[in-house]
Amino acid sequence: MYSEKVMDHFMNPRNVGEIPDADGVGTVGNPVCGDLMTVYIKVKDNRLEDVKFKTFGCGAAIATSSMITELAKGKTIEEALKITRGDVADNLGGLPPIKMHCSNLAADALNAAIKDYLKKKEANK
């Protein structure tokens, strides 16, 4: 069973969409279950000013994507990099063991977006 919070984030996902001029974009997928997530970040003064996502996947994948955007928004780059897979699941009130891989995808997509941003920033020096 899913927690009430997972159902809320699935039925009413926060921060859905793209950031056209995103500073960083991270896309990850799980070929086993077919979930695909893209996280977009906008950075200002070393803080995640905006975080959005597009996810193709199950309810848990959508809920974890929604939660990662809420956890990351307003954080510094360093703080956002410390958000773990466990943080995502805990903030959703837990996930069934068979769906824990979904929280892994959300954290991985955020990390990929931040790494993309840092790579671009380094290249523009």
Image: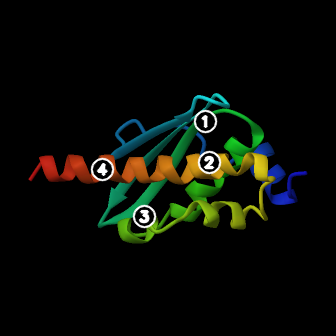
Mark sitting earlier along the chain (2/3): 2
Relative to residue 74, is residue 38 depicted above or below?
A: above
State the SS at label 4.
helix
Q: Is residue 31 visible?
A: yes
The answer to whether marks 2 and 4 mark residues whose Cβ atoms lie closer than 8 Å is no
Residue where numbered disc 2 is placed: 65
Q: Which residue is nearer to you in this view: 11 or 2?
A: 2
Disc 2 marks which amino acid? Ser
Q: Is disc 3 surrounded by few (<14), some (14 to 19) or many (20+) residues within 10 Å?
A: some
Q: In this view, does 20 lie to the left or right of 7?
A: left
Q: Can residue 14 be seen in this view?
A: no
Disc 4 marks which amino acid? Tyr
Mark sitting earlier along the chain (1/4): 1
Q: Is disc 4 surrounded by few (<14), some (14 to 19) or many (20+) residues within 10 Å?
A: many
The answer to whether marks 2 and 1 mark residues whose Cβ atoms lie closer than 8 Å is yes
Disc 1 marks which amino acid? Thr
Q: Is disc 1 surrounded by few (<14), some (14 to 19) or many (20+) residues within 10 Å?
A: many
Image point (54%, 34%), residue name: 29
Residue where numbered disc 1 is placed: 55
Mark sitting earlier along the chain (1/3): 1
Relative to residue 80, is residue 25 depicted above or below?
A: above
The answer to whether marks 1 and 3 mark residues whose Cβ atoms lie closer than 8 Å is no
Coordinates of residue 53 in the picture (x, y in percent): 55, 42
Coordinates of residue 60 in the picture (x, y in percent): 74, 45
Q: How many marks?
A: 4
Residue where numbered disc 4 is placed: 117
Coordinates of residue 25 in the picture (x, y in percent): 39, 41
Mark sitting earlier along the chain (2/1): 1
Q: How far apart are marks 2 and 3 (CA)?
A: 15 Å
- For the residues carrying marks 2 and 3, which lies nearer the camera in this image? 3
